[in-house]
Image (tube, grey):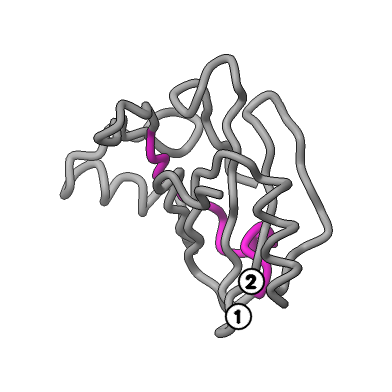
Amino acid sequence: MERVLGIGGVFLKAKDPAVLKDWYRRHLGLAIEEWGGLAFPWRRGDGFPGLTVWSLFPGDSPYFGAERQQAMVNYVVADLRGLLDALRAEGCDVDDKLEDSEYGLFGWVTDPEGNRLELWQPPAAGGAAAAQVEPA
């Protein structure tokens, strides 16, 4: 089973999201949209289309799991349920929660150092390019 297809998102916590958004706009030229992030389109060598979302979250957001975690990476996967089952069988710390939304299926696993990772299966019809992640 192919496990990870690409990076679906990079999420950062911010003490003051408005100030940090402005800094990234001004100094790095990121065209941050009203929803709090932007998307970088990409295509794998085999033609798989995708995008990587970059977004800021409030500093007190519980979305990342542990309060100390300041960033979270979202990985694009083809078969979320199958991968979560495989990770559980391998003894990984897999969150029981599974989120099914218009943006696709989301699941979470925590690595051995306590970093929460998000796994995302884009919706079949639109593929990865159809998704947008809203801050929690």
In the displayed structure, 64 sits above or below 4; it is below
Who's the residue at 68% across and 67% down the image? 65
Q: Is residue 124 magenta?
A: no
* Type of the residue with mark 2: Thr
Query: Given the current orientation, which residue lies at the most extreme bottom position?
Result: 113
Q: Percent from the top left, x then y, of residue 15?
A: 49, 63
In the displayed structure, 132 sits above or below 81; it is above
Q: How many labels does the image show?
A: 2
Q: Does the magenta stretch include residue 55?
A: yes
Label ID, residue 56: none
Q: Percent from the top left, x then y, of residue 28?
A: 17, 47
Q: Around disc 1, counting alpha carbons within 10 Å, would you say few (fewer than 14), some (14 to 19), or many (20 or more)?
A: few
Taking the image as shown, residue 3 lies to the left or right of residue 65, namely left
Quarter of the rendering containing residue 86? bottom right
Q: Name the residue under label 1.
A: 114
Who's the residue at 57% across and 31% down the image? 122
| Mark 2 residue element | strand
Q: Mark 2 points at which residue?
A: 110
Residues at marks 1 and 2 touching, judged by CB atoms closer than 8 Å: yes
In the displayed structure, 135 sits above or below 34; it is below
Q: How far apart are marks 1 and 2 (CA)?
A: 6 Å
Q: What stretch is highlighted in magenta?
A: 51-66
Quarter of the rendering containing residue 59? bottom right
Who's the residue at 45% across and 43% down the image? 8
Q: Which of 24 and 89 is in front in this view?
A: 89
* Type of the residue with mark 1: Gly
Taking the image as shown, residue 56 lies to the left or right of residue 42, namely right
Who's the residue at 42% across and 52% down the image? 10
Q: Which of 81 and 14 is in front in this view?
A: 81
| Mark 1 residue element | loop
Q: Percent from the top left, x then y, of residue 119?
A: 59, 51
Q: Percent from the top left, x then y, of residue 123?
A: 61, 25
